[in-house]
Amino acid sequence: MRENKFRGKSIETGEWVYGYYVYTNDRHRIIYEDYEGFYCEEEVDPETVGQYISLKDKKFEEIYEGDIVSYFGFKYEVLFRNGAFGWMEGGEFYSFSEMTPSVFDEFEVIGNVYENPELLEGKRMSDKECEEFVCDYCGTELDETDEYHTTFHTCDKDCYMKMVGLSWSDFI
């Protein structure tokens, strides 16, 4: 069963609060159970509220909407679109629900968009500089003005999938 949990940054302390999200009387709050078993509430910044996506990364850390995850050296923001959690790549939305568990085991939470926005400035984690701008898989020369080429360093999705050792059947 899917766990319905949220997080948000406390307006009072600036710390993350985890629990049930409630919006009433123009206030955004997280209700949580304290260490003694009492229910407490904390007003949170609505811009930081994100839902737990019911998945954990390869280090068993819970993944929330707004997290930044690394996948084979590429970085993505966890988003909620069209009723699903996923990420944007090359202008397309990819849902976590369409992935097999073995593929998902390669994701790792490396930060979030509220505290670490700089992580998304460059999509590629490695600072490897290429003498030529070529596909990392097949060596074909790439177009430096093409957003897909500059983001993923591959000709197309097929080369990218081969580069990371996957096939399309892994997602079915």
Image (cartoon, rainbow, N blue to C red):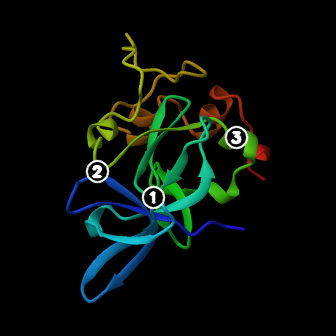
Outermost residue toward the top in this view:
131
> Which mark, by number, is residue 65?
1
> Which mark, by number, is residue 17?
none
Q: For mark 3, what is the residue?
A: 103
Label 2: element kind: loop
Q: Determine the image quadrant of residue 10.
A: bottom left
> Taking 127 as reference, is 74 above or below it?
below
Alpha carbon distance from label 2 to label 3 = 27 Å
Image point (72%, 68%), residue name? 1
> Taking 59 as reference, is 56 above or below it?
below
Residue type for callout 2: Tyr
> Which mark, by number, is residue 114?
2
Q: Nearer the viewer, mark 2 or mark 3?
A: 2
Q: Residue 171 appears at what percent x and percent y?
A: 73, 49
Image point (56%, 30%), residue name? 72
Pick whichever, 17 or 151, lies toward us.
Answer: 17
Q: Residue 6 appears at what percent x and percent y?
A: 46, 65
> Which badge, 1 or 2, is on the more N-terminal residue?
1
